[in-house]
Image: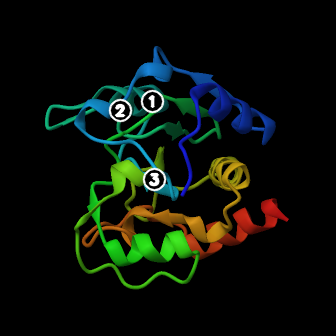
Amino acid sequence: MAKPMSARTFLKILKDEGLRVEEVGDWRDHNRNSAGSWGPVHGVMVHHTATEGAERTVEICREGRSDLPGPLCHGVITKDGTVHLVGCGRANHAGLGDDEVLRAVIAERALPPENEARADGNRYFYGFECENLGDGDDPWPDEQIDAVARAAAAICRHHGWSARSVIGHLEWQPGKTDPRGFTMKALRERVAERLK
């Protein structure tokens, strides 16, 4: 069981991992804590945005949509590898997911197939939205994938977690396909390398 990081600590560990970080507006106080608990935290969840254009993508993830208020994640990782911090606290990114997957993440063991949606992922996971159309054709520049691995590794290192605490939305919630364009297995291998 891990207590969520403060905004100050979150910013520091990302910079210490060598990431280029931009703070967006009042990100330190921007959250959905009024909608439910934030924490204990158990892992990091990775998504693609299904959008293009860094400025528009960051704005959507910060403000949300008409059907889903922001923030939609904690950090937006754009194509150039910049992490744009848009929220700190509960964020609308994970939704309901498989409680067996949650137990596997907590135990840091292999993930079972996701086949139900009962556990509140917004409470338990840090979330990164990555600028990508998610169509399987939109490229993932290496600097972006490197930033995703660095951000996930920074959080895992802080909490004493292994790379098994990093999951994709598609491994959490039935019907989700994100992130599409790389495998979570390959991403976890990169995170594990950084944690050595």
Q: Nearer the viewer, residue 53 or 95?
A: 95
Residue 185 point in image, percent of width and height: 59, 76
Q: Residue at x 44, y 61 (%)?
A: 179
Q: How is the image coloured?
A: rainbow
Report the amino acid beneath label 2: Pro
Q: Is residue 183 visible?
A: no
Q: Residues within 10 Å of mark 1 (few under 14, many from 20)?
A: many
Q: Is residue 29 above or below residue 61?
A: above
Q: Is residue 188 visible?
A: yes
Q: Nearer the viewer, residue 82 or 142?
A: 82
Report the amino acid beneath label 3: Phe
Quarter of the image with the C terminus in it: bottom right
Task: Name the residue carrying label 3.
Answer: 125
Q: CA–CA distance between discs 2 and 3?
A: 14 Å
Under circle 2, the secondary element is loop
Residue 47 point in image, percent of width and height: 43, 54
Q: Residue at x 37, y 34 (%)?
A: 61
Report the amino acid beneath label 1: Gly
Dot label at residue 34 = none
Q: Residue at x 72, y 31 (%)?
A: 12
| Mark earlier in primary sequence (2, 3) | 2
Task: Name the residue carrying label 1.
Answer: 87
| Mark earlier in primary sequence (1, 3) | 1
Under circle 1, the secondary element is loop
Farthest residue in the top direction?
25
Under circle 3, the secondary element is strand
